[in-house]
Image (tube, helix red, strand yellow):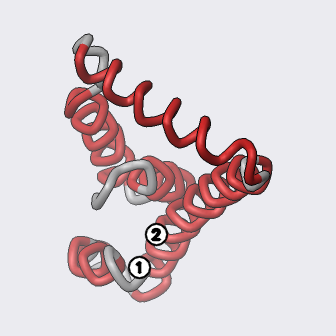
Amino acid sequence: MGMCGPLVLMAQGPSLKRGWSAFWMSTLPYHGGRVSVYTLLAAAVGGLLDAATLPSWQGPISIGAGLFLLLVYALGLAPSFRLGARLTLWSNQQFSKQRPGSMWVAGALNGLLPCG
């Protein structure tokens, strides 16, 4: 909430015109969506890293991951900014609706971007 939170608060100025209740009913779901995605990603990565902490696996996993990334970029298979642009578009569409459910979806999509 510290990184992107102030930007979202500023962007939600129009919902303040409808009152504080409308403001919080859009702000809280948005941040809830972001935090949910961050939590799920952290749990997934933590689980993978926990499984990979065996000393005999760390070297081969690191080398394999590095080679995989080099191969993906060398073959031009990296998603580049197309995926980021698509996520941004979807997030903005949900954000413009200003309903609690759509704000949660916008926050979740924003949580998949490096910095929404």
Residue at the extreme top of the image, as rendered: 75
Of 13 and 33, nearer the camera is: 33
Q: Could you tell whether 9 is left or right of 60 in the image?
A: left
* Pointer 1 residue: 23
Of 36 and 92, nearer the camera is: 36
Could you say whether the residue bearing mark 1 is in a helix, strand or loop?
A: helix
Residue 80 visible within the image: yes
Q: Residues within 10 Å of mark 2 (few under 14, many from 20)?
A: many
Q: Residue at x 31, y 27 (%)?
A: 70
> Mark 1 and mark 2 in contact (Cβ < 8 Å)?
yes
Q: In the rendering, at what x and y percent does residue 95 appear?
A: 34, 54
Q: Quadrant of the C terminus?
A: bottom left
Q: Residue at x 78, y 52 (%)?
A: 54
Give the amino acid type for the residue marked by disc 1 in the picture.
Phe
Compared to residue 16, the image places residue 83 above or below, namely above
Instruction: Give the CA distance from mark 2 to mark 1.
Output: 5 Å
Compared to residue 45, the image places residue 4 above or below, namely below
Q: Residues within 10 Å of mark 1 (few under 14, many from 20)?
A: some
Q: Could you tell whether 63 is left or right of 36 in the image?
A: left
Give the amino acid type for the residue marked by disc 2 in the picture.
Ser
Number of the label disc, if any, that sits on residue 73: none
Q: In the rendering, at what x and y percent does residue 113 appear?
A: 35, 50
Of 7 and 29, nearer the camera is: 7
Could you say whether the residue bearing mark 2 is in a helix, strand or loop?
A: helix
Q: Residue at x 71, y 42 (%)?
A: 57
Number of the label disc, if any, that sits on residue 26: 2
